[in-house]
Amino acid sequence: MTEPAQQSETKAQDKGIEVGISKLDVERIEKVVTGVLKGETGARLKAYVETCIHCGLCSEACHYYLSHDKDPHYSPVGKVKQTLWEMIRKKGRVSPEFIKTAAVIAHTECNMCKRCAQYCPFGIDIAYIISVVRRIIHRLGATPLYIQDTAHSHSVTMNQMWVKADEWPDTLQWQEEEAQAEIPTLRIPLEKEGAEVMYSVIGPEPKFQAQLIYQAAIIMDVAGVNWTMPATIGWDNSDMAMYTGDNELMGRIKRTHFETAARLKVKKIVMGECGHAFRSVYDMGNRWLGWKMPPIRIVHAIEFYYDLLKEGRIKIVKKFDQPVTLHDPCNVVRGGGLGEKSRYVANAICEKVIEMVPNYEHNYCCCAGGGVINCGPPYKMTRVNGNRVKAEQLFSAKTKGAKVLIAPCHNCHSGLHDIVHHYGVGLDIKFFADIIYACMEKPEATEA
Amino acid sequence: MVDVYTFVSGPLAWAAFTICIGGCLYRLISLIVLAYKKERFIFTYMSFSYGLRSIVHWITPFATENWRRHPVLTVVTFAFHISLVIAPIFLLSHIVLWEEAWDLRWPALPDALADTMAVIVIAGCIFFLVRRLKLPEVQFVTTASDYVILAIVAAPFVTGFLAYHQWVAYPYMVIAHIISGEVMLVAIPFTRLSHMVFSPLTRAYMGSEFGKVRMARDW
């Protein structure tokens, strides 16, 4: 009986991990691992580890496994074997080299999309187990460099992209002026106390996707939404600390976000087309802060557009005429049940929607989420090679006629972009807002 | 010989049942206490209806995506688990023992059916063994304990089958059967056979999370 051949790909070099493990020895690792396992985990991890019957039925849930010709190193349980089981078996006395491998596996070979939870007969939450491994890596100081940098940015600036305090309102003003060329009366209301909606975005929007704020402002304005954005910190709903296992920082970020909404006395927070941020405000961050459900109602962009279209507050002049296929992001569809609303929006704004298979909560992951794309360029090919199955799924939708891929999540968007390019799938990728903005009824443009 | 029989079917059986039931209760209660101490939110999110919805889907053959993807495994695992639980409880020879000891009785399965069920369990064990040896994704995560568990489960059925047919060394086979049955009972709470106790809980929790918070199907 021989073990399957080791993975042949060479693992990327990562300074965050390399420098991190250079400061470690077995004693220090033992202290941290047992500290986390004894101090921070409880009944869930115990039940998961002791109930797992090693049946391997989770394997086919994982896009990494499927994309690597069913190499068992990439199956969900295989990844747990190579990380947590070994730490438990050796009572934490593992080598720095082991931690390096564990860091790569936990941060770049699992998107924590929880598809495997739907395939395990016992409902074992393998993504949670991986998050425990990430927590251990975080406390050992061996988190991959790029994502650790975003966590540092959160810690210093309360946003993910080192956007400085003055750059934020400056960017909003810039987009307001741009949008006023289209609708002269348009405002991006800052600090409007008692507005119905606080609109929050992720750090990358002001940093390099400012047109998304422009589009959102147009949609808000035309729909007549009573909305505002904070001029202070708390505008960023993103959260990479959630994915590095820095739970304390996650709590700070979410507290700031919710408290900003509370200060503005808004009724709800509407967020842009982002998946991980939804997970953070709706599932993880709120719980860390002790809220069973978010303390202020959270409305994801998909649901927001659904409401606006259903209530007729925005009207579509002419439906988008290219056939589209719809990607179901894990965090809002498997994590928030927005599959139906997503289809309502797609059908309301597009002439033809072609389903990809599998879809809804069984959709294949984009391979970017879970902080994997945030681990940066060293792991780009980990993502791309790890998701060949997505390319095949997209090709299949394309052969049915799809020309455009709608991905209502930032991470999905960027990850799918890499996949579409690498495999030459040839689909144009869009957000819902791109299409709504292009197809909606707007007041007559005034010439300056 | 009679002495040995009296011992294994008397005090040793008492011990085995006590350890099995007591052990399962201990494991269950200590898990719940641990949850109460460190992860009390589990009780907050646990939902009876969504938990049950998830369990029902997973204990129904072919009701989940993954069962449908593995038709052979699904048939085997359901037949295996049903036989494993039903055959020992409703076997006439076992009921006779209960009647002698406690004056309890309940309807028995026809012997031929019970015999078939024993064969199903043994065949199931062989199927799982072959799966462990041959499928890379199973083999990769297999530990020695997995083989031990399979052996523990197979033993009472192999010996029971042989004892029933009285092919070889009947008295020894009966004693081996009783002892191996007792080993299995004792192993339930303290090995991964405890999935018998824990899996409804893990399933119910995931079902609750998916139903209540994530508003998605977990099957």
Image (cartoon, grey):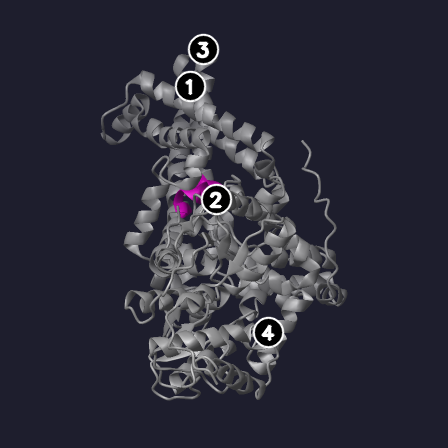
- Position of residue A244 measured from the top left corner of the image (x, y, whole percent): 59, 66
* Residue tagged 1: B161
Q: Is residue B196 magenta?
A: yes
Residue at 52% in and 72% down = A238
* Residue tagged 3: B167
* Mark 4 on the same chain as mark 3: no
The answer for how far apart the CA atoms under marks 4 and 3 are is 80 Å
Q: Is residue A151 magenta?
A: no
* Residue tagged 2: B190
Could you tell whether A298 is left or right of A5 in the image?
left
Q: Of label 3 and label 1, which has the lower sequence position?
A: 1
Span colored in magenta: B188-199
Q: Which amino acid is tagged 4?
A: Phe
Residue at 61% in and 41% down = A72
The answer for how far apart the CA atoms under marks 3 and 2 are is 33 Å
Is any part of residue A327 visible from this angle?
Answer: yes
* Mark 2 on the same chain as mark 1: yes
